[in-house]
Amino acid sequence: MPIPDHRIARAADLGRGLSIGLDEAHLALREAYEDLSDEQFHAYPVEGRQNAVSIVMHVLQQHDRFNSHLERRLRGREQLLLDQEERFDIGGAEPERLPGPEDEFPSVAEVVRAHRRLHERLLENVEAASDDDLASPGPGDRPRLSDILFCAVHHANAHTRQIWHLRGVMGAGGWPHQHCA
């Protein structure tokens, strides 16, 4: 199966390269969870670790915040597409603040819809951004907006691996067909 032209990085500029990386990272993340049942998505198969839905929502909320910085640069206002739930801010959180088995979680279908909406808007914004936009100062200690987008790609990839590990523990298996792999 040939690789679609929109995924080939021939002589890509910074924005195009980021767009390709984000597109691939979001596809891989979605493939890791979209065929799970709600029960599997909400399950805690490894004691002391998070479930798949908490990991996915953690990634999506971070990407939504990153997208809001692009929104501010491109449109003069920040706009979050997702409710930012503190319980999904799982990096370094106190254990009592983390989601647990007693919590209610969104369904796979709800998360896929939110994921697709965010993915489309994020790619739209990255592709609309000029090199000057991407080189503009980022939030916090990030010198450029492009830096937060590179972090977003790597962050999604790291958590996608976690979801595949959870799938293995649950016996959910599967391996998406990607290119010739």
Image (cartoon, rainbow, N blue to C red):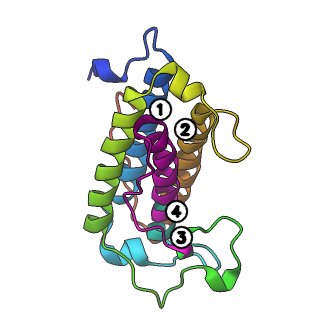
Foreground pick, 43 / 129: 129
Q: Which mark is residue 88?
A: 3
Residue 3 at least partly seen = no
- The amino acid at mark 2 is Leu
Q: Which mark is residue 21?
A: 1
Q: Residue at x 40, y 39 (%)?
A: 75
Q: What is the crowding at mark 2: few (fewer than 14 residues within 10 Å), some, or many (at least 20)? A: many
Q: Upstream in the sequence, badge 3 or badge 4?
A: 4
Q: Give the extent of the magenta segment.
A: 57-86
Q: Quadrant of residue 7?
A: top left
Dots 3, 4 in contact, CB < 8 A: yes
- The amino acid at mark 3 is Phe
**Residue at image mark 2:** 149
Q: In whole angstroms, how far apart are the C-alphas of marks 1 and 2?
A: 9 Å
Foreground pick, 110 / 78: 78
Q: Upstream in the sequence, badge 1 or badge 2?
A: 1
- The amino acid at mark 1 is Gly
Q: How far across and down, in percent of the image, does residue 117 sit?
A: 29, 51
Quick one: quadrant of the N terminus?
Answer: top left
Dots 1, 4 in contact, CB < 8 A: no
